[in-house]
Image (cartoon, rainbow, N blue to C red):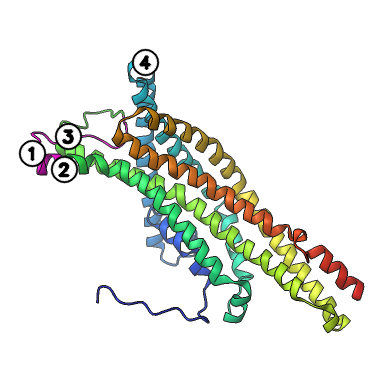
Amino acid sequence: MLFRKRKPKSDDEVVSFDDLTRFPMTFYKTIGEDLYSDRDPNVIRRYLLRFYLVLGFLNFNAYVVGEIAYFIVHIMSTTTLLEATAVAPCIGFSFMADFKQFGLTVNRKRLVKLLDDLKEIYPIDPESQAKYHVPYYRKHMNRVMTLFTILCMTYTSSFSFYPAIKSTIKYYLMGSEIFERNYGFHILFPYDAETDLTVYWFSYWGLAHCAYVAGVSYVCVDLLLITTITQLTMHFNFIADDLEAYDGGDHTDEENIKYLHDLVVYHARALDLSEEVNNIFSFLILWNFIAASLVICFAGFQITASNVEDIVLYFIFFSASLVQVFVVCYYGDEMISSVKLTDRPFGLQSKLAALQHQI
């Protein structure tokens, strides 16, 4: 059957570590990026994916150069200032996608090591996952990932396919005498990209793939940040909950010492992993805020001064940029709140002091 009714999930169903990282990993592979490519025994597949990734980014950056050339040429004319600034948000978005991909490539080994370390401390049995509230974190994380991905990919898809859909409807359904050969993004081509229909469609689908590569590389780095912070938050909250529920008076001194030792080691490792997350993603986040601020300004300007069609498109763009900034801020706040266990009524420091006093 095409639509088969899904079986309800059992309460004791185990959520694997790969389940939490599958979405960004699989999504990344659609543009040829595989973080675990060095572990792939299939050499041919590994090199084909790498070739596809490099080819995609060469095509992507070729169109970015065309956008920059268009911006430079038209910014000189005051009569086309609005048209010139219309490409500015796209250039900013492209730079962010390029910079994110560059940052991920530079920190690939560190990121893979971070994921391996998170996998080592990940709870694998149903009882432990219930204590860690893994299903809750997974559900919450998937909701944020889905909303963020849909919004960002809607922006790239709407800009990419709207001109072709509009021209098709006008030509085949509304009786237009000519098929308008427009592009979703303002590009200065080094050749005539509109006169010949074959050249037009070749250029059009190249631009569409360029937008897809930009969207995926833009989104997936943030998705990896979300999944790593979600897991670290889960570990810190488990430490707080477990310590709050622990009663040293019900155990021997040896048991309390062992519990303290294991907890301190576990807590120190979680702190080290959180520091590694900061080292890997901090500069990318800084660039995100700088570039996103410029993109939001230019997109907002287009919303206030464009026609209805452009207003809708740029509003989607504007919303995606705002959500991207919000997601980073939200998970950063979640991380800070989970680390500050001393703020809780029975925080880490006070509870440790009480246990040490009992010992």
Under mark 3, the amino acid is Glu
Report the Cα–Cα distance between label 3 and label 4: 26 Å
Report the mark closest to the observer, 1 or 4: 1
**Which of disc 4 and disc 1 is earlier in sequence?**
4
**Which of disc 1 and disc 3 is earlier in sequence?**
1
Q: Which residue occupies 54% across, 41% down? A: 288
What is the quadrant of the C terminus in the image?
A: bottom right
Question: Is residue 333 within the magenta segment?
Answer: no
Q: Give the range drawn in magenta.
A: 168-187
Circle 4 sits on which residue? Answer: 78
Q: Is mark 4 on a helix, strand or loop?
A: helix
Circle 3 sits on which residue? Answer: 180
Report the Cα–Cα distance between label 3 and label 1: 12 Å
Under mark 1, the amino acid is Gly
Report the Cα–Cα distance between label 3 and label 2: 8 Å
Under mark 2, the amino acid is Thr
Q: Which residue occupies 63% across, 75% down? A: 131
Q: Answer whether labels 3 and 4 touch (C-beta < 8 Å).
A: no
Residue 258 % position (x, y) = 81, 77
Q: In this view, does 73 lie to the left or right of 129?
A: left
Query: Could you tell me if residue 194 is visible in this image?
Result: yes
Report the Cα–Cα distance between label 4 and label 2: 33 Å
Circle 2 sits on which residue? Answer: 168
Report the Cα–Cα distance between label 1 and label 4: 36 Å
**Which of disc 2 and disc 3 is earlier in sequence?**
2
Q: Is mark 1 on a helix, strand or loop?
A: loop
Q: Is residue 45 left or right of residue 252?
A: left
Predominant secondary structure in magenta? loop
Circle 1 sits on which residue? Answer: 175
Q: Which residue occupies 62% across, 72% down? A: 132
